[in-house]
Amino acid sequence: MLPVASADLPGALPVAATAVAILAVAILFSRRRSTGGAPAAAPGQGGKPIPSPYPLWSDLALDVTVKGDFPDAVKQHAQFGPVFWWRFLGRRLLMVGDYEASMRLLKGEHTIVEADYPPSVQHLVGKWGIANLASKQHMRIKRLVQAAFTPKAIRGYMPRMQAMAEEAVHKWTAQGDILAYNEMKWYTFRVAVSVIAGFDDSWTRPGPDGFEHVNALFKDWLDGLFSFPIAIPGTAFARGMKARGGLMQRINASLDLLEQQTQEKGQKGEAPTGQEAEEQAEQPTALDLLLASRDEEGKGLTREQICDNVLVMLFAGHDTSATSLTRIFHFLHLHPEAAERLRQEQAEVLAKHGAELTEEALADMPYTEGVIREVLRIKPIIAGFPRVALTDFELAGHTIPKGTRMQCSLAQPLLTDARWAGEADPLQFRPERWLDGAAHRTGAWIPFGGGPRLCLGWLLAMAEMKVLLAVVFRGHKMTVHHPDSPWALFPLARPKDGMPARLQAVRQQ
Ligand code: HEM
């Protein structure tokens, strides 16, 4: 959901100067729960030091800002081992890149570690947003909204998702050339708004005060997410905070409207309220669940708590899936044999299950699922997650002191874990590796994280991606115009040119 990185900034020289200035200030001020400016090599078990290959000036943030890319963690870990030290905005970071170690951190959430986003994330997400909540408060919100993301709930969303996918494909075919990344965002955002909030179409309709505005706000918000947290006008952080203000205004306005509608219906005796409404609603949205929640004293969540969580879910619920879909279409363009096989599978599913995309039809698409799984394995959208140690503990043969900040890789285990290394070509895109069951070995696939912070919407993401692929590959073909164009990897991976592409109808065999 939330990536870990710095902003993507234009212009190398001003960028470098800004980065140096930011870095200097950051080093002076960033000492919250810090392990201090201790020497790079810390003792491990038996006195074995943890490698610290980079001197202070080679701050990770500086690398990211100047080069625009996060260094290749897989290569770094191959060179320096499963754990090594780096620095990020003046904090000493333990880089963790090993399946067992990653899983230990994921499962140890709230006991040995806790999610640890930098101050910019805390401000932009809001203090009540699920990503910023710890232990009991985190689990409370997660339990509350989980009912909107169960297999049963997703079954209920299928007809709506199919209709949205069909509308999208119709629009793209009529348009001719499209910017695939933006269009994927439009599709996934429509799904997110419908499932998470049930807001009206003012959020998603085409036009400057509809989706264009919302998309621009989310872009500025995301660019500010990993920036230096002082709102000097013109900085990414200031723009991000302004965008947060704009998004909050829209969320509040939509909540006011919903309240007004509920009141009007209540006055006319049409609608139940509170607990009753929750029980009677056929499928409550995540927002319905937040609104209906009461603690032991009968108190509900505050408006601020609700708004922060709607914001984080709307973001997490669309940007990650949009990037994944863009990647998938990119891979399918580069691998026409895979696209052909996917098309054949869809023809078979159509013949067997009919046009309606039911839960059974989706379950009968092993190759389509293999394509999605393989893209998320080779190019995981979230490369890693930040954590801080709540206590002293052992990791990969080293003693990790309380307060240590960590950046834990998801990409590394997805590519190089022993479960993959046992296969002939672990770095290659081979959707068929998912057909024989070999790749299903426990835990080998973790692009959605795991443990208490396992992605809330992973089943929804899988379903909406399958639905769109099914609709596209039942009679259409996507051609990517510049498949060699570069991708920016931060704050979230995206094609720098938006991936110009064309969707065309093709005759079905
Ligand atoms: C392909 C799409 C997606 C990917 C790759 C993805 C990945 C992830 C990952 C790796 C995490 C764990 C972060 C951590 O451990 O710190 C996460 C958390 C989260 N995801 Fe997703 N996600 C996707 C789609 C979605 C969707 C559709 C939603 C819809 C609501 C969603 C909502 C969330 C939320 C709310 C969290 C925070 C959970 C918590 O803190 O307990 N994600 N996601």
Image (cartoon, helix red, strand yellow):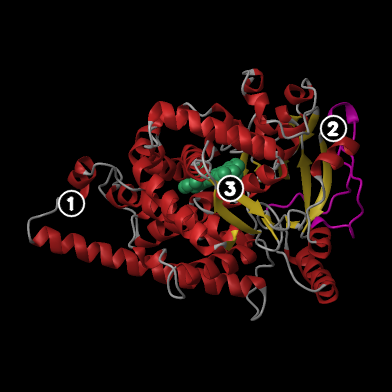
Q: Secondary structure at mark 2?
A: loop
Q: Earlier in the sequence, mark 1 or mark 3?
A: 1
Place of residue 196 in the rendered image (x, y in percent of width and height, measured from the top left)? 39, 51
Q: Quadrant of residue 309?
A: bottom left
Q: Nearer the viewer, mark 1 or mark 3?
A: 3
Front residue of 359/133: it is 359
Residue 43 in magenta stretch: yes
Ligand 1 closer than 8 Å to the CB at disc 1? no
Q: Secondary structure at mark 1?
A: loop
- Is 132 left or right of 285, judged from the image as shown? right
Residue found 81% across the figure and 37% down from its top: 83
Q: CA distance from mark 2 to mark 1?
A: 58 Å
Q: Which residue position is annotated with label 2?
A: 44
> What is the three-letter code of the residue carrying label 2?
Gly
Q: CA distance from mark 1 to mark 3?
A: 47 Å
Q: Earlier in the sequence, mark 3 or mark 2?
A: 2
Residue found 44% across the figure and 68% down from its top: 206
Front residue of 397/175: it is 175
Q: Which residues are magenta?
A: 32-60
Q: Which residue position is annotated with label 3?
A: 477
Q: Secondary structure at mark 3?
A: strand
Q: Nearer the viewer, mark 3 or mark 2?
A: 3
Residue 21 in magenta stretch: no
Q: CA distance from mark 3 to mark 2?
A: 54 Å
- Is 188 left or right of 235, judged from the image as shown? left
Q: Residues within 10 Å of mark 3 (few under 14, many from 20)?
A: many
Q: Can you see residue 391?
A: no
